[in-house]
Image (cartoon, rainbow, N blue to C red):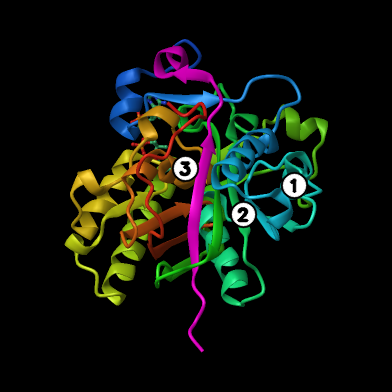
């Protein structure tokens, strides 16, 4: 029996309208446009503003857009996985809320937390359901309202993050396209360098934790940078090597957008020209689980069936990994109608 492969068959993304520029940050913390641009590549990021709006509200925009665009009925969706570190609430899962808001009534759904690597972990999880032969239409969502856990008085973190959501449809592949290989890794000892101190079972929320600002992102930037630059480059080179891919065989690198210097180091290690690397960090910053689907969405009309694509990410945990896939459809002429500029 031939092995069933899972392929991406549609993508959609949503970024909220409100823009927070480096210049605006200059008036909030002791920083400069020059410092942020040269150290990270970021010029502006999007912020979900408005009372009562959460991660699911952006995710639903992406999911409804995706269902419409691919002509998929919500009733045909069997599974929804949402990768996020900023769930609407501790429980139930944001994926459950997305299903409710998007009218998806026949699927089961759950969240997956692997920090900035969550979207690639979720793609591989979804692909295993499809490869089992038991599932034909699975939605993978990557969404984060990072502004809900950013301390806008901390210049080391507030310059980095932004809000966004993206969603892909995954189905059994035709013609040998789809997910070919993946390498996923975890090193939990890295948690000391990047985490949220309070709000979990070790340190539940209290007046003290709020006063001590322990519900915000805690990041030792330099330490994370060192691991990220090695981890993402290593795993991307390794997946090329074990699939006998030379630089000229790779059509696109789709890297997690954490820092332009990490992306450049990864591309250099793979021997790729900058023109084959999807980079939109300058406009959105690090949107955690939103980065990879946002890139796929913005570059979709350049993608052709059979294109060899490497997805690569590094994040808190530590978690990291890479996916090798063959793009499965002609994205040419796909019309973009969300807020992504
Ligand atoms: O996606 C999840 C994984 N996360 C990452 O991959 C993030 C990885 N880390 C990074 O991207 C970088 O480490 C940062 C962008 C967070 C920081 O860049 P850096 O080049 O590592 O800067 P640094 O922390 O080494 O700081 C260098 C200097 C320090 O001043 P001194 O001690 O040299 O006087 C900082 O205090 O820059 C200072 N600094 C700033 N200056 C202006 C730190 N933040 C700022 C700022 N504006 N926003």
Image quarter in which the C terminus is found: top left
Query: Which is closer to the viewer, label 3 or label 2?
Result: 2
Front in this rendered view, residue 169 or 223 = 169
Within 10 Å of disc 1 (Cα), the crowding (few <14, some 14-19, many 20+) is many
Does 89 appear in magenta? no
Residue 189: quadrant of the picture: bottom right
| Residue 151 in the figure: left or right of residue 268 | right
Could you tell me which residue is drawn at 56 percent across and 75 percent down?
131
Residue beneath disc 2? 139
Label 2 element class: strand
Sequence-first tag of 3 and 2: 2
Q: Quadrant of ligand 1?
A: top left
Could you tell me which residue is drawn at 80 percent across and 38 percent down?
205
Within 10 Å of disc 3 (Cα), the crowding (few <14, some 14-19, many 20+) is many
Label 1 element class: helix
| Residue 264 in the figure: left or right of residue 42 | left
Query: x, y percentage for residue 48?
Result: 61, 25
Sequence-first tag of 2 and 1: 1
Sequence-first tag of 3 and 1: 1
Front in this rendered view, residue 56 or 146 = 56
Front in this rendered view, residue 22 or 95 = 95
Residue 257 drawn above or below residue 156 = below
- Ligand 1 within 8 Å, label 2 CB: no
- For the residues labelled 3 and 1, the Cα–Cα distance comes to 22 Å
User: What segment is highlighted magenta in the picture?
Assistant: 1-26
Could you tell me which residue is drawn at 65 percent across and 31 percent down?
148
Residue beneath disc 1? 99
Residue beneath disc 3? 291
């Amino acid at each position: 029996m031939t092995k069933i492969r899972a392929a991406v068959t549609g993508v959609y993304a949503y970024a909220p309208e409100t823009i927070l520029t480096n210049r605006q940050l200059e008036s909030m913390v002791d920083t400069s446009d020059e410092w942020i641009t040269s150290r990270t590549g970021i010029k502006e990021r999007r912020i979900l503003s408005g009372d009562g709006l959460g991660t699911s509200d952006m995710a639903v925009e992406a999911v409804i857009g995706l269902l419409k665009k691919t002509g998929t009925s919500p009733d045909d969706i069997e599974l929804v996985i949402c990768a996020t570190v900023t769930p609407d609430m501790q429980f139930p899962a944001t994926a459950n809320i997305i299903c409710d808001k998007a009218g998806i009534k026949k699927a089961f759904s759950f969240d997956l937390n692997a920090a900035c690597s969550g979207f690639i972990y979720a793609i591989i999880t979804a692909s295993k359901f499809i490869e089992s032969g038991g599932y034909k239409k699975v939605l993978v969502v990557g969404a984060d309202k990072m502004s809900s856990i950013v301390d806008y008085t901390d210049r080391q973190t507030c310059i980095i993050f932004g809000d966004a959501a993206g969603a892909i449809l995954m189905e059994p592949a035709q013609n040998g396209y789809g997910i070919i290989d993946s390498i996923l890794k975890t090193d939990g000892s890295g948690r000391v360098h990047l985490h949220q101190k309070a709000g979990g079972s070790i340190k539940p929320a209290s007046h003290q934790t709020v006063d001590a600002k322990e519900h915000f992102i805690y990041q030792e930037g330099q330490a994370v940078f060192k691991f990220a630059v090695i981890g993402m480059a290593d795993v991307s080179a390794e997946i090329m090597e074990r699939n006998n891919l030379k630089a000229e065989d790779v059509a696109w690198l789709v890297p997690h957008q954490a820092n332009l210097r990490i992306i450049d180091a990864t591309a250099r290690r793979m021997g790729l020209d900058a023109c084959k690397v999807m980079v939109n960090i300058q406009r959105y910053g690090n949107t955690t689980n939103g980065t990879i689907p946002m890139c796929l969405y913005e570059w979709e009309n350049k993608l052709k069936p059979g294109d060899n694509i490497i997805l690569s990410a590094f994040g808190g945990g530590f978690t990291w990994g890479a996916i090798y896939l063959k793009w499965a459809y002609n994205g040419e002429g796909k019309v973009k109608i969300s807020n992504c500029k």
